[in-house]
Amino acid sequence: MQRDGVFQSVCSLDCPDQCGLLVHKEDGKIVKIEGDPNHPVTKGNICNKVRNMTNRLYAENRLKYPLKRTGAKGEGKFERISWEEALETITSRWKKLIETDGPESILPYSFYGNMGNLTAEGMDRRFFHRLGSSQLDRTICSVAGGVGYKYTMGGSFGTDPEDTIHSKLFIFWGINAVSTNMHQVTLAQKARKQKGAKIVVIDVHKNQTGRLADWFIPILPGTDAALALGMMHILFAENMVNNAFLQQYTVGHEELREHVVQYDPETVSKITGVPVEDIYKLARMYGQTSPSFIRIGNGPQHHDNGGMCIRTISCLPALTGQWFVKGGGAIKGNSGYLAYNGDHLQRPDFLKNKTARVINMNQIGEALLTLTPPVKALYVYSSNPAVVAPDGNKVRQGLEREDLFTVVHDLFLTETAMYADIVLPATSAFENTDFYASYWHHYLQLQQPVIEPYGESKSNVQVFKLLAERMGFEDPAFHESEADMIAGALDNPENPYLAGITYDALVKQQFVKANVKPLFPGKLPTPSGKIELYSEKMKQDGYPPLPTYIPLRNDGEEDSSQKFPYLFIPAPNHNFLNSTFSNNEKHQALEKEPRLHMNQQDAIAVGIEDGEMVRVWNNRGECELKAAVGENVLPGVVVTQGLWADMEGTKQLVNSLTPNRLADMGGGATFFSGRVDVEKLLK
């Protein structure tokens, strides 16, 4: 491996942009990371998170070798051990558990802390399928909206973001894109400058994206479906629909026309908090502007009604025929275009017990505390549930169990690792071979190692190979190289968009675009082959077949709206990605401090002034945060930004307040459907 030079790379963060990078090395170390100007979409622009990545890669507290716990769980006392001792401890403990309690007493817990496909869903899935462990339902992020969108469009297929340079109207709906999809904002700004395009933002908080907009529309949390239905009401009533498109490419448009009569602007205004005149203005702007494009964000799906909400918004481009216009349509996600051979990567056929229990990752705290038979061993990688999982106090209570044998594989001694019996040092993405598939743009990208492994750190692929060997798994799949795994994953005859894309092609070109064509004219992977405004499949699955507004639940008790008067939204911030970077001083300094955004009207009513410390609480927990008082949220709504872990003398773990109940579709999370009360903190 060369010790000096500039090397192509790819960002590994769970972000739709998946930027092309140039990594500068001196004497074997990365000294600078910048964007690759030759990447067709990201074009050399990167975020602060990645620009300052070296502070994370070479942080003093990065793990260099395996550790075993010597103190109480959560105390943070560990001593160095060898990999030999670590692997022997893990596998001998697991073998005993399998004998006494069965393999389902063991549970993996992971997500996409590293978006490399081998890292996130490769050798690990093979291993736990072969082990026969309890299976994890990985639903914490986008599943509810993904299911809802699929009912309408048949899968994760949307507009090519490169085409949105032609759009004349951008609606950023429930997405702080400046912080979470910056290159879509870049495209919108170019279209605004070159073609006079307008940018509209619909959100519960006037965040950085809202401040950039030509028009910001504040909305009450969980009511987005009602606003979309109100727009449909006006589009039909004022004949702003494309009847030819509806006739040829949709099913159920006549039923929808009748259905949305009930969602008149006056009714919708009372539900959403959006003024009647603004509902008319928005609908007319959308109905009369072409191309118009909707970027559907992650936010609205994190509600009790999240799946139905996204299903509803996704119907709008069909009404105006925008799918037929270059730069028109919508993006919820585009991962369907880059769908690889997941069965080859994950080998679900290794799981012999097809009725092995499945545990939803959003309810990990409940699972660790109440499941019978209990989870006796937990293996955590590429995730930090002590910070990111809902109902955080229950999660930590579960992790405190002395009879729970916990292993954590990570770059740092995370908040979860503090409860571990064994901690294993993980490589960064720059030390691995892996391939990446964006869920926004249409490019596959290859990562080859840029630097040597840090200390004694190992990749997920390496560790699960070692564990498989010690467990006696002799299947050839546990001996495949990373190159072989990638080649097999790219061999997916079911996805014509990947035709001709091979491992060798990625080695030569670094990034390769899928063979994407416009959705229309064409046939969608829905039961009818068309956009399903009316979905018979939804009816069969127990949902209303037409888009419908369904109010949020009462947050677990009948009088919750009286007892806890504020809807609570723990949104992302600009300089962290979930808990990643939250423990790095540079990124903490960029973000400054956690704050609670509160409407001035609410603050005056309870005697809270801007900058004062407040207590935020409900039946699940409490936080102490600084109030940011103003007009950035509607009355009755409070918003935080970022997952700030508790540090000494602080109470700022916002997921101690969030519900662990599941969304209407896919078992998704309901982070944004909780309620809290707020009072001035008296000390």
Image: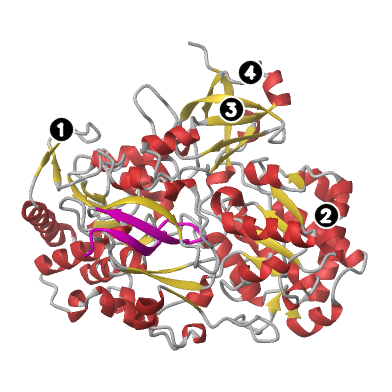
- Which quarter of the figure has residue 587? top left
- Which quarter of the figure has residue 582? top left
Point 76% across, 46% down: residue: 217
Residue on which the image places disc 1: 71
Task: Determine whether the residue tagged by mark 1 lies in a helix, strand or loop.
Answer: loop
Point 53% across, 73% down: residue: 442
Which callout, 4 or 3, points to the residue nearer the camera?
4
Which callout, 1 or 2, points to the residue nearer the camera?
2
Number of residues whose C-alpha sits closer than 10 Å to that of mark 3, classed few (under 14), some (14–19) or many (20 or more):
some
Residue on which the image places disc 4: 608
Number of residues whose C-alpha sits closer than 10 Å to that of mark 1, classed few (under 14), some (14–19) or many (20 or more):
some
Which residue range is magenta in the image?
1-26
Residue type at mark 3: give it. Asp
User: Which mark is first along the chain, 3 or 4?
Assistant: 4
Task: Determine whether the residue tagged by mark 4 lies in a helix, strand or loop.
Answer: loop
Q: CA distance from mark 2 to mark 3?
A: 33 Å
